[in-house]
Amino acid sequence: MTCVRGDEGLMSYQGTGRVVVVAVCGMERKVDSQPMKAILVRLQHPNLKIIIFSESMILNDPVEEWPICDCLIAFFSMGFPLEKAIAYSNLRKPLLINDLKSQYHLLDRYEAICCMGTF
């Protein structure tokens, strides 16, 4: 696996197999957490390239300048621009590991409890 931290996210190819670009989008404290590191270790595979969107890029750059990816993992936390992440997913149409729009439910405790009651 090629793991790149930063703003480069171009598709790459290794031999004849296509490399799938998986992007991690979240605030630094969430991305650098032990649970996230454990997930990234488990994702190691020769056909996967993991890129981590920098917090600076997420907060300051327009989504049109974010790296292109095939698959997006995005985690909401305080300060995370959820609207920008949704705009990016609408623009680039990556496979979403978690539903970004559903993360709005986490912002309202009552709504979160109501959603949990539907499972």
Image: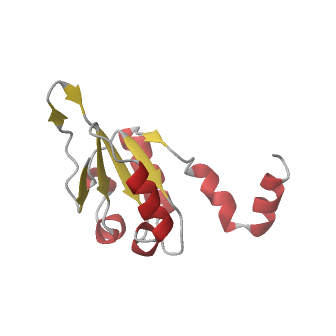
**Residue 90 percent coordinates (x, y):** 44, 42
43 with respect to 114 (left or right) = left
Q: Is residue 29 above or below residue 43?
A: below
Q: Nearer the viewer, residue 22 or 43?
A: 43
**Residue 7 percent coordinates (x, y):** 22, 59
The reply to whether residue 87 is in sight is no
56 with respect to 76 (left or right) = left
The reply to whether residue 90 is in sight is yes
Q: Nearer the viewer, residue 50 or 86?
A: 50
Q: Nearer the viewer, residue 33 or 73?
A: 33
Q: Nearer the viewer, residue 37 or 116?
A: 37
In the rendered image, which quarter is residue 47 located in?
top left
Q: Is residue 61 above or below residue 51?
A: below
Q: Residue at x 36, y 69 (%)?
A: 59
39 with respect to 64 (left or right) = right
In the rendered image, which quarter is residue 15 located in?
top left
Numbered-mark total: 0
Q: Is residue 34 above or below residue 100?
A: below
Q: Residue at x 16, y 34 (%)?
A: 14
Q: Residue at x 45, y 51 (%)?
A: 73
**Residue 79 percent coordinates (x, y):** 49, 74
In the rendered image, which quarter is residue 77 located in?
bottom right
**Residue 60 percent coordinates (x, y):** 31, 69
Q: How are the residues colored?
A: secondary structure
Residue ranking furthest to the right: 117
